[in-house]
Amino acid sequence: MSQEAERGATLLNVEELSVEVLTSTGWTGVTDTVSFQLRRGEVMGLVGESGCGKSTTALALMGLLPKASARVASGTVWLDGTDLYSLSRRQWEDLRGDDISMIFQEPMSSLHPAFTVGEQIAESVRRHRDLGRRDAWQRAVALLEKVGMPEARARATCYPHEFSGGMLQRVLIAIALACEPKVLVADEPTTALDVTVQAQILDLLRSMGAEFDLSILLVTHDLDVVADICDEVVVMYAGQVVEQATVKEFLHAPRHPYSRALLAGSRPDGDDSTELHWIPGAPPTPGALPPGCRFEPRCAHAHDRCRAEEIALQRHPDGSAHRCVLDLSAPRGE
Ligand SMILES: Nc1ncnc2c1ncn2[C@@H]1O[C@H](COP(=O)(O)OP(=O)(O)OP(=O)(O)O)[C@@H](O)[C@H]1O
């Protein structure tokens, strides 16, 4: 079997995506030629410290960048063979929900306070499927049952403020899955929840992913979450992809010094916290990038070449990639 077949066919192909945002000095790049491939049925973690461009990337591939302050400068996103940036506004609206859905950290901000959750799920179903009100309502109740909502029929008639954060995230997952999309983009979906509820929502995502044959792009800063449910990882630093690897490769033999630093920092002695908060220094701000490698000022392995030239992303035959003159994964011996 070819390596491509073993890893599954590519469903979402992000090619050289660069996004700019409007700052006091004008349009400034915040992501730079981001490329990765999400395969069918795969759960991919998009990780990196705060400000590295994870959410911007996620919004860009949903066509949801805030128009006044952010724009795609270059690059292409293909979803199952469709060039997303060639779509009209109307086609984007049809695609979102139908083929690709997104859930956010704060479920409350995605729901309308004045409508019951059942109405909101049914509305999402009706927007994409030719169903009458009664059938859409039945589907909403069935979806709530599927995402583990107790007493789904009764809870469908409740308003968002009547739910806990974890239950609201289940409602959002029900809306996201209402039309059985191919891809779910989840931006820190468990960050606002307490630890027990986080585990339940991750279990739900995992089981929904398997049941619906979903590909999931999971934006997270939590490496426990990555280890728990992801198959593949894309590591971003200062707007660039610095490593793409299977979770196993990433956890046991990361190639890039930044990946290694994240992993080391997520396991401080006597503390099982996995927040990415400890690497000395801070990522550069978008308008003030160092010459050469963007991680060089914080890198324990840096040398002259890293300061002198930009480092290209190297692609490897097994589908992984890294952006460094070194390869720290000694066992693979490159
Ligand atoms: N609409 C915007 N206008 C101005 N700057 C923006 C906008 N959106 C993002 N940025 C800037 O782009 C950079 C990347 O932000 P982004 O939210 O994508 O990072 P992130 O990795 O998702 O971080 P976090 O984990 O904190 O959400 C940051 O410097 C951020 O301030």
Image: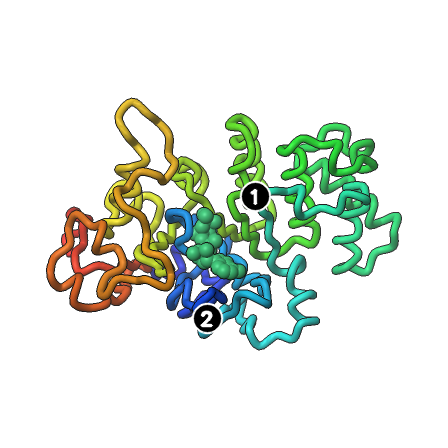
Q: Is mark 2 on a helix, strand or loop?
A: strand
Q: Determine whether label 2 and label 1 are within 8 Å by CB.
A: no
* Crowding at mark 1 (Cα within 10 Å: few <14, some 14-19, many 20+): some
Whether residue 43 can be seen here:
no
- Residue drawn at x 23%, y 61% as measured from the top left: 293
Q: Disc 2 versus disc 1: distance between alpha carbons?
A: 29 Å
Relative image position of residue 42 (x, y in whole percent): 47, 51
Q: Residue 105 carries which label?
A: 1
- Check the image and report above or below for 137 versus 70: above
- Check the image and report above or below for 199 versus 251: above
Is the C-beta of the residue carrying label 2 under 8 Å from the nearest atom of ligand 1?
no
Whether residue 32 can be seen here:
yes
Determine the residue located farthest toward the left in the rendered image.
Answer: 304
- Residue drawn at x 81%, y 41% as measured from the top left: 116
Mark 1 belongs to which amino acid?
Answer: Gln
Relative image position of residue 180 (x, y in whole percent): 65, 53
Front-most of residues 85 and 70: 70
Quadrant of the rendered image containing residue 67: bottom right
- Residue drawn at x 23%, y 65% as measured from the top left: 291
- Check the image and report above or below for 22 versus 275: below
Q: Residue under circle 2?
A: 26
Determine the residue located farthest toward the top in the rendered image.
Answer: 270
